Image (spheres, rainbow, N blue to C red):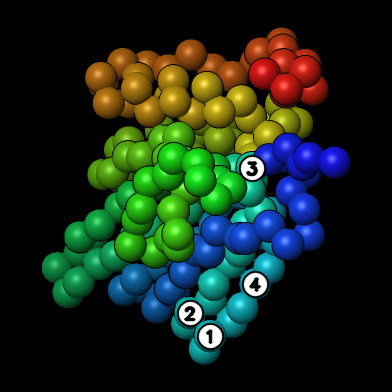
């Protein structure tokens, strides 16, 4: 029996995400997504593992004595071995990059979009990957994004059930 990315086998390799949290200096956290594993390295570092097909988001922020020096947000999909992927410093071996943005105004717009999706009762990790690409492209162009709708979500779930 072959396994789809949504239903990986028990031995499927995990995409590993290392997160660091030093209050007021380096703060990296998972905004949404369900890790299959978690390993706490020490008080400030942990490694999360995601099964192939899992969509998750990482918010990264850093500051120095003068204020914020980094504000980034990425939505990623864990991939199976052999699938195309993007590498990032905190990600092993890589993942499909669905959305990437930097700078607080854009990060805030992504967080507002996620809040609006969750207000519909939809788990952000289950949103159509095409929507995250749409949001990425609209942010990059400086245009407002279309809101994600229940109808769009139902259509995505039906396409996904058909394997498309």
Q: Earlier in the sequence, mark 3 or mark 2?
A: 2
Q: Quadrant of residue 92?
A: bottom left
Q: Which residue is mark 4?
A: 38
The local crowd at label 2, few if under 14, some if 14 to 19, many if 20 or more residues have their Cα within 10 Å, is some
Q: CA distance from mark 3 to mark 4?
A: 17 Å
Q: Which residue is mark 1?
A: 41
Q: Residue furthest front?
A: 1
Asked whether residue 124 appears in the rendered view, the answer is yes
Discs 3, 2 touching: Cβ within 8 Å: no
Q: Residue furthest right?
A: 1
Q: Earlier in the sequence, mark 2 or mark 4?
A: 4
Q: Earlier in the sequence, mark 1 or mark 3?
A: 1
Residue at x 64% of width, y 42% of height:
53
Q: Which quadrant holds the C terminus?
A: top right
State left or right for residue 102 relative to residue 135: left
> Front-most of 31 and 157?
157
Q: Which residue is mark 2?
A: 45
Q: Secondary structure at mark 4?
A: strand
Image vertical order of residue 158 relative to residue 48, above or below: above
Discs 2, 4 touching: Cβ within 8 Å: no
Residue at x 79% of width, y 22% of height:
161
Residue at x 60% of width, y 43% of height:
55
Q: Earlier in the sequence, mark 3 or mark 4?
A: 4
Return the x and y of residue 4 as percentages of the image width and height.
73, 38
Q: Quadrant of residue 1?
A: top right
> Front-most of 108 and 76?
76
């Amino acid at each position: 029996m072959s396994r789809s990315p949504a239903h990986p086998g028990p031995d499927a390799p995990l995409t590993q995400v290392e997160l660091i949290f030093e209050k007021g200096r380096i703060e990296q956290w998972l905004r949404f997504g369900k890790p299959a594993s978690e390993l706490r390295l020490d008080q400030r570092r942990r490694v999360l593992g995601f099964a192939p097909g899992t969509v998750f988001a990482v918010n990264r922020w850093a500051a120095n004595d003068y204020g914020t020096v980094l504000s980034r947000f990425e939505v990623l999909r864990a991939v199976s071995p052999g699938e195309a992927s993007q590498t990032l410093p905190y990600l092993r071996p890589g993942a499909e990059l669905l959305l990437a943005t930097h700078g607080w105004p854009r990060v805030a717009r992504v967080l507002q979009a996620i809040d609006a999706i969750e207000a519909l009762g939809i788990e952000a990790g289950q949103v159509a990957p095409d929507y995250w690409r749409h949001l990425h492209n609209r942010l990059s162009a400086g245009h407002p994004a279309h809101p994600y709708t229940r109808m769009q979500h139902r259509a995505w779930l039906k396409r996904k059930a058909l394997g498309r």
